[in-house]
């Protein structure tokens, strides 16, 4: 089953969750052949029920000890800019779309997302500047994440 | 008046001795090899959130020679303890249970102002000194949460007082590509080994060590 995994880390990122379960984004995902959506929502106020996205099997949870299994199972990972999820997704060779939380002031994790983007390991956008649908409709869903050079290149 | 002058001179003398000793302790670092006597006890500053994730990735690749492992987390942190227990549970049978978890007051909350940070850091220092005297680790490993600054200062204090030389190993967070964090800027001068994970930082900070991505 073609799966998208969305993770927001230890805090909350309601804008991202709302964008991903919006009708536009769901349609875009279904059109790309995705059948399952798994959301890790953290402390956010939105915890969608299993039937909130027609066309997709939806599963949402707040926290897990390890999201490694969810990343392994996913065909596309959408993440906040957290270093942990970036490293884990790229380490597992999964295509990664980073959505930066532009409501966080002085978000230093942005530096990592920008750098990994500049080195073509991932795509990144913000909820406001680019709608999730637009991002999904660009090359995000099909980029071949350059994991080999991620492993080799970054080790000097 | 003479007494006052005497106190003043004594004070200056203590500061000078302290500084000289500090220089000596920091300089001595690279020649110090704690592993010679067998296992190395390590104090790991986990901090919270992303810092914890990163340092636990690093801990996952350390051999079992590093034991016991003492983890320090911020007292307001709920998640890190679970993550540490998950990592420790995945260790080999004979190496399991060889760790402790300690809580210290957070020295700086996210977005806390600079001036009040000084006071909260002093408060954290009051907890850090007895903790370090108790545990006497060989190595202090940290990657930049605010909590690590008072702990490193406490570690240096043990060295200055001659109680024990604690090797301070600082690994800057992989999130730092162009600029060091505040903790990094402070500990660049005080740590024995200072690692960065991007070549652009190595260029700016020549004393740092760049071995590629280590987490």
Image (tube, coloured by chain):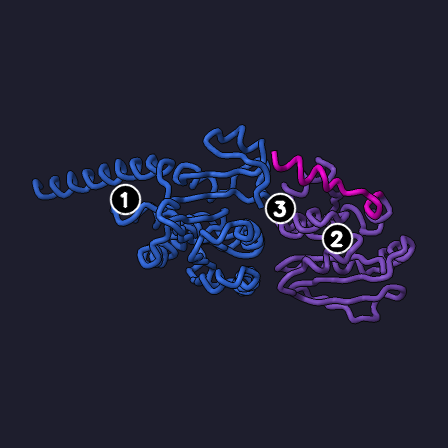
Q: Residue B179 appears at what percent x and percent y?
A: 55, 37
In the displayed image of the protein, which residue is found farthest to the left?
B2
Q: Is residue B95 visible?
A: yes
> Chain ID for label 3?
A
Q: Residue B31 appears at what percent x and percent y?
A: 36, 36
> Is A144 inside the magenta-drawn segment?
yes
> Chain ID for label 2?
A
> Is B153 inside the magenta-drawn segment?
no
Q: Are marks 2 and 1 on the same chain?
A: no
For mark 1, give the secondary structure: helix
Residue behind mark 3: A109
Query: Vertical placement of B6 versus B44: above or below?
Result: above
- Which dot, 3 or 1, sits closer to the camera? 1
On the rendered image, what quadrant is the N terminus of chain B found in? Answer: top left
Whole-angstrom CA distance, mark 2 to mark 1, is 48 Å
Residue behind mark 1: B160
- Which dot, 2 or 3, sits closer to the camera? 2
Q: Residue B105 appears at what percent x and percent y?
A: 42, 60
Q: Residue B190 appears at what percent x and percent y?
A: 39, 39
> Magenta part of the protein: which range?
A139-156
Examine the image and state in which quarter residue A2 appears.
bottom right
For mark 3, give the secondary structure: helix
Query: Vertical placement of A102 versus B71: above or below?
Result: above
Q: Nearer the viewer, residue B53 or B92?
A: B92
Identify the chain drawn in purple.
A
Residue behind mark 2: A78
Residue at image coords 29%, 48%: B164
Residue at image coords 62%, 59%: A11
Query: Vertical placement of B142 versus B93: above or below?
Result: above
> Chain ID for label 1?
B
Identify the chain drawn in blue.
B
Residue at image coords 15%, 38%: B9
């Amino acid at each position: 089953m073609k799966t998208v995994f969305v993770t927001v880390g230890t805090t909350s990122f309601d804008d991202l969750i709302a964008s991903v379960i919006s009708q536009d984004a769901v349609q875009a995902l279904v059109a790309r052949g995705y059948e399952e959506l798994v959301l890790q929502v953290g402390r956010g106020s939105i915890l969608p029920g299993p039937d909130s996205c027609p066309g997709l099997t939806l599963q949402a949870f707040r926290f897990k000890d390890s999201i490694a299994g969810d990343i392994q199972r996913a065909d596309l990972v959408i993440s906040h800019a957290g270093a942990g999820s970036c490293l884990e997704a790229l380490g597992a060779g999964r295509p990664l779309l980073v959505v930066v939380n532009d409501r966080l002031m002085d978000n230093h994790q942005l530096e990592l997302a920008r750098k990994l983007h500049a080195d073509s390991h991932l795509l990144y956008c913000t909820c406001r500047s680019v709608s999730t649908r637009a991002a999904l409709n660009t090359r995000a869903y099909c980029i071949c994440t350059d994991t080999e050079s991620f492993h080799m290149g970054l080790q000097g | 008046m003479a007494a006052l002058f005497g106190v003043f001179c004594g004070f200056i003398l203590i500061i000078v001795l302290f500084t000289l000793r500090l220089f000596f302790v920091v300089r001595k670092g690279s020649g110090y090899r704690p592993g010679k006597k067998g296992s190395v006890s390590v104090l790991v500053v986990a901090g919270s959130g992303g810092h914890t994730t990163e340092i636990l990735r690093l801990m996952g690749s350390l051999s079992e020679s590093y034991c016991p492992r003492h983890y320090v987390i911020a007292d307001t942190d709920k998640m890190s303890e679970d993550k540490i227990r998950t990592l420790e549970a995945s260790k080999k049978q004979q190496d399991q249970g060889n760790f402790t978890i300690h809580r210290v007051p957070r020295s700086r909350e996210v977005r806390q102002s600079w001036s009040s940070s000084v006071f909260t850091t002093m408060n954290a220092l009051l907890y850090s000194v007895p903790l370090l005297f108790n545990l006497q680790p060989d190595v202090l490993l940290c990657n930049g949460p605010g909590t690590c600054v008072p702990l490193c200062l406490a570690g240096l204090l043990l060295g200055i007082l001659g109680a024990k030389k604690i090797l301070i190993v600082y690994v800057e967070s992989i999130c730092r590509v162009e600029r060091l964090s505040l903790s990094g800027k402070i500990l660049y001068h005080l740590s024995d080994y200072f690692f960065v994970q991007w070549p652009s930082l190595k260029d700016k900070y020549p004393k740092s060590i760049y071995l590629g991505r280590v987490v």
